[in-house]
Image: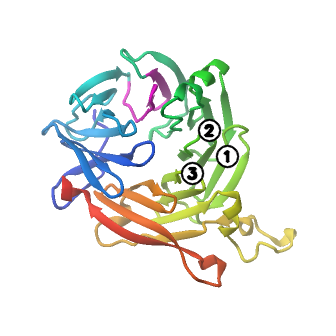
Amino acid sequence: MNTRQAITETAQTHQKLLYASFNQDSSCFAVGYETGFQVFNTDPMDPKVKREFGESGGIGMVKMLYRTNYLALVGGGKNPRFPMNKVIIWDDLKTKDALNLNFFSPVLNVFLSRTKIVAVLNNKIYVHGFGSPPKSISNYETCDNPLGIAALSPGAYQDQATTSQILAFPARAEGHIQLVDISSAGKERNLVSIIKAHKSKIRCLALNKSGSMIASASDTGTIIRVFSTQTCTLLFEFRRGLDRAVVYSMEFSPNGSKLAVLSDKQTLHVYNISGSQQQQNKHHMFKNLPVPLKPTYFNSTWSFCSIHLKDNGEGFSTDKGVLGWSGENAIIILWMRGKWEKYSIMERHSDDPSKKFEIIKEGWRSLSEDA
């Protein structure tokens, strides 16, 4: 039974987009649809690869390995190209599958590194070596995880064997995060950590590029927490809003100094992580009230800049998006309706510290123009 449904439909080509994802450094992104997949350069957006498999060519998931010719594919849509319980490692140089992994239930998420293939199922995560044949390295039990929530730090591309590579996923206890170092050194030390992050289920996770910090959001979606992966201590707690929200995507900037958060409230929030710039984050005007009179809400730290992404009559209000960065002050959103948008963080002249920065939409393009 096919459980991966098409998310939206573009008006121009009637192509149903099933998936969109950035590669490890956000320099490229890939999209899957009912008849194949495409790869684009991120900024400027430029089509690089297009593979058509015909009417029975649905690609429900596509993940790139940096800018190499290897991609992980999982079938999806009305007529999947591959079984949904199978991960295909596609060699685009040879335009055929190079490796494949079979599981007993649908694959909900996949991550690639130079040495590892990570497959996320509903209750389990499998780690295999990136070789022929792929050898099983380890597996981990999780709570029910129907959205395939997990995160993998890229590690050092040229020498991952001696660099920590953190895999994060919902632990068996609700609201907890399990961290595992799946690098060779981490495997030898058997490093596993548990973070008590939230009271409700984990909804979204993001690791910075070095794997030293992890950001988390729960089903409630009002609070974003950032933890150290080395000590599991809470580093930052940010407020996204007061109303319950679904956090679709979170992503650290390339050097880890900022965190972008996108939710179903159609708002994009950006928080400063850098020690020297944390004062730019906003606080409530009543923060300095005497402690006995002060609700916890007044202690909240808010984003230093944000933007409301208004409904433009294209079904925007229910659309999902994926975040990536093309620089320390440039954010890319891939909308599942088939649209690429670029937003820039700009400093403006203002005596009001709360209005010193703003997010400006710099450009957009429809993916269907290149379909």
Of the residues shown, which amino acid type is indicated by label 1?
Phe
Label 2 residue SS: strand
Label 1 residue SS: strand
Q: CA distance from mark 3 to mark 2?
A: 23 Å
- Give the residue displayed 66% in from the left and 78% down from the top: 353
Residue contact between numbered discs 2 and 1, judged by CB atoms under 8 Å: yes
- Give the residue displayed 48% in from the left and 59% down from the top: 262
Closer to the camera in the image, 337 or 27 = 27
Label 3 residue SS: loop
The residue pinned by badge 2 equals 177
Q: Main secondary structure of the magenta part?
A: strand
Residue contact between numbered discs 3 and 2, judged by CB atoms under 8 Å: no
The residue pinned by badge 1 equals 227
Of the residues shown, which amino acid type is indicated by label 2?
Ile
Residue contact between numbered discs 1 and 3, judged by CB atoms under 8 Å: no
Q: Is residue 124 above or below residue 362?
A: above
User: In the rendered view, does 17 fall on the left or right side of 331?
Assistant: left
Q: Is residue 102 above or below residue 223?
A: above
The quarter holding residue 301 reads: bottom right
Q: Is residue 290 above or below residue 81?
A: below
Q: How is the image coloured?
A: rainbow
Q: Position of residue 292 (x, y in %)?
A: 86, 69
The residue pinned by badge 3 equals 255
Q: Position of residue 5 (x, y in %)?
A: 29, 44
User: In the rendered view, does 264 fall on the left or right side of 82?
Assistant: right
- Give the residue displayed 44% in from the left and 53% down from the top: 324
The magenta stretch is 105-129
Q: Position of residue 330 (x, y in %)?
A: 46, 62
- Give the residue displayed 40% in from the left and 71% down from the top: 361
Of the residues shown, which amino acid type is indicated by label 3?
Asn
Q: CA distance from mark 1 to mark 3?
A: 16 Å
